[in-house]
Amino acid sequence: MSREKLQKLGIDLPLFPTTTVGSFPKPENLMQARGKFARGVLTAAELEKLEREATEFWIRTQEQIGIDVLVDGEQYRGDMVAYFAEHVKGFQVSGLVRSYGNRYYHKPIVVSEIDWSRPVTVSWWQFAQSLTAKPVKGMLTGPYTVMDWSFNEYYPDRKATCFALARGIRVEVEALIEAGAKIIQIDEPAVSVRPEELPIAIEAMHMVTDGLPAYFITHICYGAFENIYPGMLETPVENFDLEMSNSNLDLLELFKRHPFTKDISFGVVDVHSHLLEDLDTVKKRLKEAAAVIPPEAIWVDPDCGLKTRSVDEAIGKMRLVVEAARSLR
Amino acid sequence: MNLILTNNGSYPRIGETPELQVLRRTIAQWERKEKADEDLREAERVMVRAAIREQVEAGLDVVTDGQIGWYDPVSHLAGRLEGVKINGLLRFFDTNFYFRQPVVKGTIRWRSPQLAEAFRFASTVSSKPVKAVMTGPYTMARFSIVEEEKYRSLPALVEAMSEALAEEVGALAAGGAEFIQIDEPAIVKYPNDLPILKTALDRLVSRKGKARLGLMTYFGDATPLWEPLQALPVDLLGVDFTYSPKLVDRIEGGGASKPLTLGLVDGRNTRLEGEAELIRPLERMLPKLPADGNQLGPSCGLEYLPRDRAFQKLQNMARLSAGLRGQKRGGAK
């Protein structure tokens, strides 16, 4: 159990600690400002001012709701991969590529050696942490996922690209720890897509986390977990943050067959539905989790990032998470 | 030996300029009810014209309509069948693209032609022959959630899907389609299902008329099922060589019993192919293939690439293969 590690890091959390997966919706004024910045009619400094205001709003909101482990809300990021590609040498941002329906994104291209000598997220983490006494998670996208969501024109293959990114992300992790971060989440949503590459993802995570004094979480979502479980438990992190509600807690059946041996951040609300679940439904999900996984290993959160919800919906979903957790403590 | 340069499916429906973003803009406005259905159709037509223009300019002999009007490779056709509803998003194989999953709730019935009009329009605006491309019944069935009891067995579901899609093939053939390509990427993941696929293809072939019907596989290694694949009742067999690197040796050694659609251009990565990836394998395989009708093109649809790179890939393919094509045609370089 990883409580001991948290305590060694000076972090004391209640039973069923509450957190969120990372992103929050951007307020309307920030969305408009991002559009203006893209059109060149707003300066970077003007945009950053609004990003900082939005970050402060979300820190205050999480505190007010009673979340135990906070996030900065990623108000300054476009998406989980392109943001890093824009700030790390070795990437070029490509033209638009469709992700589904009428949604498009700029998929990065690795065009030269990855050079992650300058930390990307540290100043934002420092700003967010300066606003609260509660722990704020360092939030990164993992090397396997950045590789999988990028084109590669430089490295010989996927593995080499992934490992080059892992070496870079370790620099970021070390800088976050140096700045004071004690809980660091490294998201790997792509990891379940090619089960045969799970060993590459695990080795890359070793390169990122081995020997470093932090409590590590990895978030995985929307995948065929049955293809990578229980092998994924070998990933060197303390906590798996998993989307559970969107799949009707199906994974619990897997966990009954092969015990879940790490801490879990258990998604108790569906982030892709506008509807707010009722409290009893959320409590029931948590009770079902606690019947299969030791309660002291369970953190409670939404399934995934809340950025696709409205501000009110995101707040409503967070309140449910906190109320359900508190009622079962 | 003739080598036909083709596109094998989609073409990016967006670019970096406002003109090339008309479809995205119009769909967003249409969803807000600010634009009418006809505005949407016109925006699609604008992007079909652009897709065809670029494919011709790049040097292709046979183009596609870019599948510009397709929401995704699965729900576009499945969602229009009676008895099928469309559900949430699911990742399309190992790509970074998501499709909406069909849910089979009742008896599957074909309603009306969905592709014939798009084919007709593309043909009228293209100076080159247009290949009609459609996802096949096996892959469609594999991606469906089944709630209707009588389709609980995969063969029964594939049979129903193939009966419906045979009508599409018939409508395309009646509309003058010369090449019809059936995409069945799922079969390389489930090689044991080849007999199910064969039965489905028999049904499609029965409606193809004078068209040449091709089978396209991608996102998986075709080498382990190479022999039975060649026995399928199609005129052309398509392979994604980015996933099947050893197949070059196999074909060089044993040839192929029917013309191939050679997916040698990586439709999933921006890096442009060099002679080593494109020309050397062709030089090894072409002498062992049937003399006529082989196609060279991308390993899959091109929508996984940004527009400029999709164009460059096709242009690069045409440039690199020009010598080879000239040499084969003229007998000397």
Image (cartoon, coloured by chain):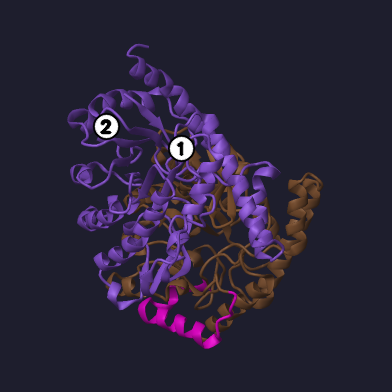
Chain colours: A brown, B purple
Q: Which residues are magenta?
A: A274-301
Residue furthest to the top in view is: B332
| Of the pair B128 and B331, the residue shown nearer to us | B128
Front residue (pair A125, A141): A141
User: The disc labelled 2 sits on which kind of residue?
Assistant: Val
The subunit carrying tag 1 is: B
Q: Secondary structure at mark 1?
A: loop
Whether residue A102 is in magenta: the answer is no
Residue B248 image label = 2
Q: How many marks?
A: 2
Instruction: State yes or no: residue A279 in magenta.
Output: yes
Quarter of image, res B308: top right
- Residue at the image point whose x is 35% and y is 19% from the top: B329
Residue B311 as seen in the image, left or right of residue B146:
right
Up/down of B52 relative to A10, above or below:
above
Residue A125 picture location, percent across and down: 65, 56
* B208 lies left or right of B232: right
Q: Are marks 2 and 1 on the same chain?
A: yes
**Mark 1 burial class by Cα count in 10 Å: few <14, some 14-19, many 20+:** some
Three-letter code for the amino acid on which mark 1 is drawn: Pro
The label number, if any, that marks residue B129 in the structure image: 1
Q: Residue drawn 32% across and 40% down? A: B239
Residue B119, position in %: x, y? 48, 48
